[in-house]
Image: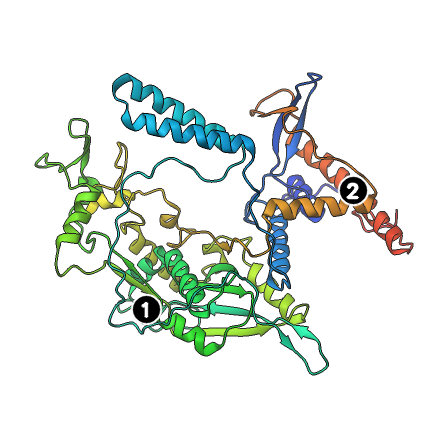
């Protein structure tokens, strides 16, 4: 055998790349987290690998695909329910009733106490609240903190009115009956977009970058989650029942977020257009259209004032509450931003079990393994420049009341603390891979399927165990102690060795599953190894 040349060796695949490809092909996590499991009964310890659980394919394709399939199953199960999901809360038990009564007595005593006695009762109240939480009670009995700031609910004059109906306690849409007596409940696939910021080309880049409204695009992206909440609220009030949804937020080619919703039940397109036209979200924040400071000359923290002060005069900046009080006192105050949906709306009726339903579910979940920015990778300089301009518009824009960027506009953030850096907010919305959208990518209503993702995982595990004929019970969570293995620990094998073991174990599991499935179907199929040969 001749010795390969340097150029030939450079074209050879690396060993770690080959192993990673085999691991991905067999559904093995390529970035497993090594943890040490200690049995508290026997004292035995072992190092086990736990999947990293990444949701992005650029980090771990296997875990991201597993999460995507789980979301697809969640969407499919809740979209065409024919019966109301069972979500009735369990009645309070004797322990919870006793603790609630004790909480009432302590609350009354604390209101009348002073000094050391009040401090002691406050400590007891904290203990009782922890016991209530441990007993399985949701929520808290602690009194509310500062009063919530509210504004007038009078609708804007430039927005059409929307009739409001009493919302019925149901989540199912209307059922239709065919002439032959069959009943069916169609559902809806809806897409909503944001308004135009200027003409764009087919690749999403603006025709005239100077005329493109990047500031409005940035603010619309920052406040898009609130606009979605307002749309769902208006929709439920208008149609008169508790509409359930499975929604996914994705960027368009112009990088503006848009919304795909799987809605249970049908709603006419005319009604949807009325709700969209009447939906808006007002942002009542202090003005932030003109920078008062730069990141280099930003206000500094003063321990004496317990807040941020002007670097030149040393005067403390207005607090967040003071800035809002000034905004409330101004008779001609206007909201900083008003978010609305665009005029484009696409609604499609979908029937249960149809090819169209499966296509919509695949469309809803196809980008869940990518970050917002990865959905449309820039293919040239114009697209990259478009991303740069949007990122520049987001850099100094406040993303929330606690954002450090408020210091650039002469206002202290809410709950200001030392160490906040103006122009370097660490929130998701300011990161380049999120393009201004800091909310969740997947939005699922509480009564969609009546189950959590944990419930769906448990069902899939139970199905596999039942197919294999095993009756494994869930382990006692209090029996084991878990600790992450630190790098350099002598007990942990090299990553390549752990991946090879995991691939072999995965192949064994797959062969056992295929054998059990063939047995259940009453057929005989040769099992295959990961090399594609009959075993």
Q: Which residue is mark 2?
A: 509
Could you classify mark 2 by the number of other residues whose Cα lies within 10 Å: few (under 14), some (14-19), or many (20 or more)?
few
Comparing 8 with 266, the one in front is 266
Would you name the residue on which mark 1 appears? Answer: 197
Colour treatment of the image: rainbow
Using a 10 Å C-alpha cutoff, classify the residue at mark 1 as few (fewer than 14 neighbours), some (14 to 19) or many (20 or more).
some
- 472 vs 60, left or right, is right
- Say which quadrant the N terminus sits in: top right
Q: Name which of mark 2 and mark 1 comes first in the sequence.
A: 1
In this orientation, which residue lies closer to the viewer: 72 or 26?
72
Q: Nearest the camera: 159 or 255? A: 159
Residue 477 visible at all: yes
Q: Is residue 297 above or below residue 265?
A: above
Q: Is residue 494 left or right of residue 370?
A: right
**Residue 494 lies in quadrant:** top right
Q: Give how far across and how far down residue 385 sits, in percent.
A: 36, 60
Q: CA distance from mark 2 to mark 1?
A: 53 Å
């Amino acid at each position: 055998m001749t010795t390969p040349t340097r150029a030939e060796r450079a074209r050879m695949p690396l060993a770690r790349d080959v192993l990673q490809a085999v691991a991905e092909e067999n559904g093995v996590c390529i970035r497993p987290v090594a943890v040490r499991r200690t049995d508290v009964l026997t004292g035995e310890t072992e190092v086990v690998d736990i999947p990293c659980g990444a949701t992005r394919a650029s980090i771990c394709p296997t875990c991201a695909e597993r999460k995507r399939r789980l979301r697809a199953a969640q969407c499919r199960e809740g979209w065409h329910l024919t019966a109301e999901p069972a979500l009735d809360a369990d009645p309070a038990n004797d322990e919870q009733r006793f603790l609630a009564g004790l909480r009432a007595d302590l609350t009354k005593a604390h209101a009348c106490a002073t000094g050391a006695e009040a401090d002691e009762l406050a400590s007891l109240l904290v203990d009782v609240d922890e016991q209530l939480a441990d007993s399985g009670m949701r929520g808290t009995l602690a009194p509310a903190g500062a009063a919530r700031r509210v504004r007038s609910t009078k609708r804007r004059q430039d927005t059409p009115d929307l009739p409001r109906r009493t919302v019925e306690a149901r989540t199912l849409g209307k059922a239709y009956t065919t002439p032959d007596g069959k009943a069916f409940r169609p559902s809806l696939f809806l897409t909503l977009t944001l308004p135009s910021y200027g003409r764009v080309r087919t690749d999403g880049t603006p025709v005239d970058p100077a005329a493109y409204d990047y500031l409005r695009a940035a603010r619309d992206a920052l406040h898009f989650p609130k606009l979605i909440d307002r749309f769902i609220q208006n929709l439920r009030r208008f149609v008169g029942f508790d509409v359930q949804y499975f929604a996914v937020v994705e960027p368009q080619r112009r990088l503006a977020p848009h919304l795909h919703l799987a809605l249970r039940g049908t709603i006419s397109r005319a009604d949807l257009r009325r709700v969209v036209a009447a939906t808006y979200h007002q942002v009542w924040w202090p003005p932030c259209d003109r920078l008062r400071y730069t990141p280099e000359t930003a206000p500094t923290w003063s321990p004496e004032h317990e807040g941020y002060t002007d670097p030149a005069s040393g005067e403390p900046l207005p607090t967040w509450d003071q800035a809002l009080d000034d905004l409330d006192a101004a008779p001609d105050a206007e909201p900083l931003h008003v978010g609305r949906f665009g005029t484009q709306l696409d609604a499609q009726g979908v029937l249960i079990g149809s090819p169209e339903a499966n296509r919509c579910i695949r469309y809803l979940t196809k980008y869940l393994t990518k970050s917002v920015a990865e959905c449309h990778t820039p293919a040239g300089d114009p697209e990259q420049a478009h991303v740069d301009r949007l990122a520049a518009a987001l850099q100094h824009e406040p993303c929330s009341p606690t954002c450090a960027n408020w210091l650039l506009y002469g206002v202290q953030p809410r709950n200001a603390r030392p160490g906040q850096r103006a122009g370097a907010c660490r929130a998701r919305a300011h990161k380049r891979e999120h393009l201004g959208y800091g909310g969740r990518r997947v939005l699922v209503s509480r009564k969609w399927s009546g189950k959590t993702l944990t419930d769906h995982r448990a069902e899939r595990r139970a199905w596999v165990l039942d197919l294999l004929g095993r009756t494994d019970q869930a382990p006692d969570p209090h029996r084991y102690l878990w600790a992450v293995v630190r790098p350099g620990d002598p007990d942990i094998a090299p990553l390549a060795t752990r991946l090879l073991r995991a691939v072999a174990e995965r192949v064994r599991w797959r062969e056992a599953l295929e054998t059990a499935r063939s047995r259940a179907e009453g057929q005989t199929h040769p099992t295959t190894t990961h090399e594609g040969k009959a075993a």
